[in-house]
Amino acid sequence: PGRSIFEPAAFRDVLFFLAWATPLVIFFAVWAATAVNIPYQDDIDAILESTSVIAGGLDSFSEFWAALSKQDDERRIVVVRLVACLMYWATGSVDFRFLALAGLCSYLVFFRMIFLWFRARPNLSMVLLLPIPYLLFSNFNYEALYWSIIPLQQIAIYVWGFASIWLISQNTRAGLVW
């Protein structure tokens, strides 16, 4: 049974919401106050080099794809490069803070999936969800949070992989189409 937005919320519900929202607000506020728009290590060759090649103009889709999927050390970082190129085409520059923020927002997707999973199981108390935002939105992996390539390359990819598995496990048409 859902609540109407016009019903007064119980004090307990307000406290519960604040307990969940506090780590999110602190996490993004600290990140926004301390993140800088400067490339770090692999950002230079992995993002800027491919973006400048693509911005210089390519003659075919195969050249575009080759620039996006070029081997960088032991990995191919197509998603990060594609987002950087889209940002460059839209704004005329590459903002490393925005690249990291785009990846960090995948934490919100992951938290939403966990919340929906808890809510779908009436035998589980929502109190059990309370530690999740404190673990998920902590600065335990601070190096990954401030290095613009990592949030989209590793954090977001794992979250989207988990989302795909979770949607397929729901055994619905939407989950199977995903």
Image (cartoon, rainbow, N blue to C red):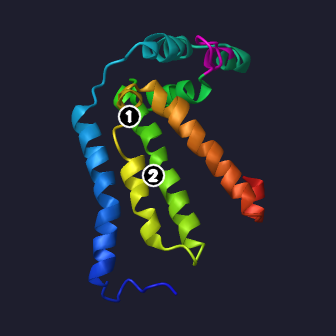
> 10 Å neighbourhood of mark 1: few (<14), some, or many (≥20)?
some
* Helix, strand or loop for disc 1: helix
The front one of 3 and 96 is 3
User: Which SS type dominates the magenta stretch?
Assistant: loop
- Nearer the N terminus, badge 2 or badge 1? 1
Q: Dot 2: what SS?
A: helix
Spot occupied by residue 46 in the image (x, y as percentages of width and height): 51, 15
Residue 98, which numbered label? 1
Q: Which residue sits at x=57%, y=78%? A: 122
Which of the 4 image quarters holds residue 27? top left
**Type of residue at label 2?**
Leu
Q: Quadrant of residue 90?
A: top left
On the image, the x and y values in percent for residue 156 come to 53, 39
Q: Are marks 2 and 1 in contact (CB under 8 Å)?
A: no
**Label 2, label 1: how far apart the Cα atoms are:** 16 Å
Numbered label attached to residue 146: none
* Residue 161 percent location from the top left of the image: 65, 43
Name the front one of labels 2 and 1: 2
| Residue at 30% over, 79% down | 12
Q: Label 2 neighbourhood size at 10 Å, few (<14), some (14-19), many (20+)?
A: some
Residue 68: say if magenta.
Answer: yes
Image vertical order of residue 164 relative to residue 100, above or below: below
Circle 2 sits on which residue? 108
Q: Is residue 102 visible?
A: yes
How many badges with numbers are in the image? 2
Instruction: Judge whether 1 appears above or below 98 on screen.
Output: below
> Considering only vertical position in the picture, is 22 above or below 58?
below
Residue 89 visible in this rendered orientation of the protein: no
Give x and y (percent) for residue 7: 35, 89
* Image: magenta residue range: 66-76
Badge 1 amino acid: Phe
Magenta span includes 80: no
